Amino acid sequence: MMWSWIPSNAGLIRQYTLDNAYLGIVPALLGLVISVPLGIACVRWRWLYPPVLSATSILYALPSLALFIVLIPYTGLTDTTVIIPLTLFSLCILLPNVVDGLRSVPGPVRQAATAMGFGPLRRLVQVELPIAVPLVIAGLRIAVVSSISLASVGQLMGIYSLGYFFIDGYQRDFPTEIVVGLVLIIALALVCDVLLVGARRLLTPWQPRRARRGNRRVLRGRAVLEVPEVAA
């Protein structure tokens, strides 16, 4: 391998890393913006959750490359062609976490908030959503990592990302590019994951830093999430 290729292409590496980060983070954030009100509605009207969950699961099962191709006539070879499918994929991960997070709020906690004069909106914002934050961010961590990985597929349509190094390295039989692209995607995913863990700790200072024994494990999609027991 020719590692001297790295410093001579530092500008290109930096640009494609930023492009990949943008294509990976924005869809997850958009998915969160959609999932929170949709999850609140699913908790409020329980009959709504099964059909919405089925719809998001069907979308998640669709091949990403097929969605990219379908969108090209409408959005062209732009970032939007990648962002829309990845946003839809993130809904399948985030929506169940939002719903489960809100449902994990103990009944006595809701009753205590109501007894203290909290209205439905104030109780939602100041009591229920803060308690749901750990589960929501757990889902966001998975959504961001998945989007960062899938964003590289956009390079097949000419939408620049770290996927460029995979394609160019393969075509030129130059493994250095492939290794660099792989390492950068992993590093980018780890950095985003650490930042989200830090955000969770800032938003939930009452949570213990280490998981307590007896935590229950909840299977959602393709990942196992740790859910702390909430004392009534």
Image (cartoon, grey):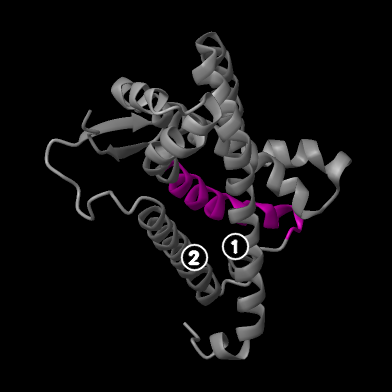
Q: Quadrant of residue 67?
A: top right
Residue kind at label 1, given as amino acid type: Ala
Q: Is residue 171 visible?
A: yes
- Does the magenta portion include 143? yes
- Quickly name the residue at label 2: 188
- Does the magenta portion include 118? no
- Front residue of 42 and 226: 42
Element under label 2? helix
Q: Is residue 163 visible?
A: no
Q: Which residues are magenta?
A: 139-159
Classify residue 25 as left or right of residue 2: right
Given the current orientation, which residue lies at the most extreme left position? 213
- Front residue of 34 and 56: 34
- Front residue of 92 and 45: 45
Q: CA distance from mark 2 to mark 1?
A: 7 Å
Q: Quadrant of residue 62?
A: top right
Q: Are circles 2 and 1 on residues that touch, CB within 8 Å?
A: yes
Q: Position of residue 227 (x, y in %)?
A: 28, 37
Mark 1, Cα crowd under 10 Å, few <14 / some 14-19 / many 20+, is: many
Mark sitting earlier along the chain (2/1): 1
Residue kind at label 2, given as amino acid type: Leu
Q: Position of residue 231 (x, y in %)?
A: 21, 32
- Front residue of 201 and 127: 127
Classify residue 1 as left or right of residue 229: right
**Magenta span dominant secondary structure:** helix
Find residue 21 and name its label.
Answer: 1
Find residue 104 and name its label.
Answer: none
Q: Position of residue 128 (x, y in %)?
A: 43, 32
Classify residue 154 as left or right of residue 230: right
